Image (cartoon, grey):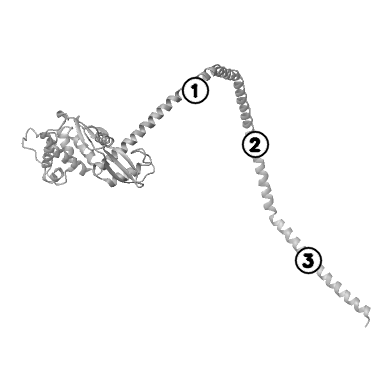
Amino acid sequence: MNIGAGLAAVDGYFQAGEHAQDRDYLAKQRAFQAAQMQAGLDTLPDQTAADKARLGLSLDTSNAGRTVLPGQTANAVARQGLDSADLTFASGQQPVTQAITAGANRAALDNQPKQQAVATAALDRSVAQIPEDKKVQADTNATQATARHMQALVDLSRYLGANDKAGALAHVNAVADSESAQAGTRGKKFVDIVPSGEKTATSDNRAFDLVAEDGSKVSIPFAAMSQAQALSKTGKYTMHEGRAGDVHVLNENTGSLETKVPANPDLVRSASMNQHTPALLQIAHAYKLADPSLTETQALDKAKTSTEKPRHQAILDLVSKTAMPGQDMNKEYQKWADLYDKARGGAPSNSPAKPTIDPKFQNLFTP
């Protein structure tokens, strides 16, 4: 076999295959381009319509701009006029503003020496007052220390007066560091209180010895304790006024209450008036039942107000609040009429009988 002829045949075979591949690629390319062209032809009407719409919108926008342009121009001109007027006004006011500022500066400059003189005088007074302030502070401190000392003795005298040694020791140890009870107690722990000394015709050296753990003693003169006891009896008083003009004085230390000004008889309920108090309370009870939101005080105030109304009006008001369907209205009216008259302080002119209390309310008014 001729080798040259075989190689030529093989080469021709491969070239034929490449030509076939090229022809296939070109066919696919033409098909793709044809599809693209067809798609362009299919969408061309829509693209044309969209372009026309965009051009129409641009035209309308331009027309609108031309329509509003004169107004915008007029507004701009008006704003410029306003700005010009503001500038003109500000320019005209500038001399006035400057004059005011200059006047204020001149006044401040003129007053500066006076203000300095006032400040200097105030400082001089403050400096001159320092020694007096120190004296006042020293006096105040001394007064407060004395008050603490006396209060400590008052408290101690109460414990000793009640024979409560444990309470007295606890109190002494509580105030020991501040030396409120007696000088020399700071830093000590006291375990006992022992009376010492005696009273004679010419002298009195009685004292209460505070005995410390270390055996040392701090004495409190009996005279100081007596003075403290007198102070505790004197105590702190407060005044209380009664509704009838009476004045009472309460000793807050001892709890005793003294009447310094007796009550005015004209303002005090008499025995005959007191017997009508239950009637007023029954009326208040009726208001409370009719309106449970009322407090006892509010109900009593309403009852008092009702007795100030005309008799017939007040009784009808009470009947309307308490009457139940089917009740005898005449009896209900008469019941409240009697209570109204009793609350006013007397029986009705046509019923001189002695006032009585409804038995079902009796427990409300029993002391």
State how far apart marks 1 and 3 are (Cα).
112 Å
Q: Which of marks 1 and 3 is in front?
A: 1
Which of the two labelled residues, at mark 2 and mark 3, occupies the earlier sequence position? Answer: 3
Q: Is residue 244 above or below residue 107?
A: below
Quarter of the figure that contains the C terminus: top left
- Front position in the image: 350 or 339: 339
Residue count near mark 3 (Cα–Cα under 10 Å), binned few <14, some 14–19, many ≥20: few
Amino acid type shown at disc 2: Gly
- Residue designated by label 2: 65
Amino acid type shown at disc 1: Leu
The percent position of residue 76, horizontal first and vertical second, equals: 63, 29
Whether label 1 touches label 3, CB < 8 Å: no
Residue 151 visible? The answer is yes
- Front position in the image: 353 or 228: 228
State how far apart marks 2 and 3 are (Cα).
55 Å
The percent position of residue 115, horizontal first and vertical second, equals: 52, 19
- Front position in the image: 155 or 330: 155
- Residue designated by label 3: 27
Q: Quadrant of residue 195?
A: top left
Whether label 2 touches label 3, CB < 8 Å: no
Amino acid type shown at disc 3: Ala
Which of the two labelled residues, at mark 1 and mark 3, occupies the earlier sequence position? Answer: 3
- Residue designated by label 1: 123
In the rendered picture of this protein, how many numbered marks are placed on residues?
Answer: 3
Is residue 154 toward the left or the right of residue 79 in the image? left
Quarter of the figure that contains the N terminus: bottom right
Q: What's the residue at 17%, 43% (across, down)?
A: 322
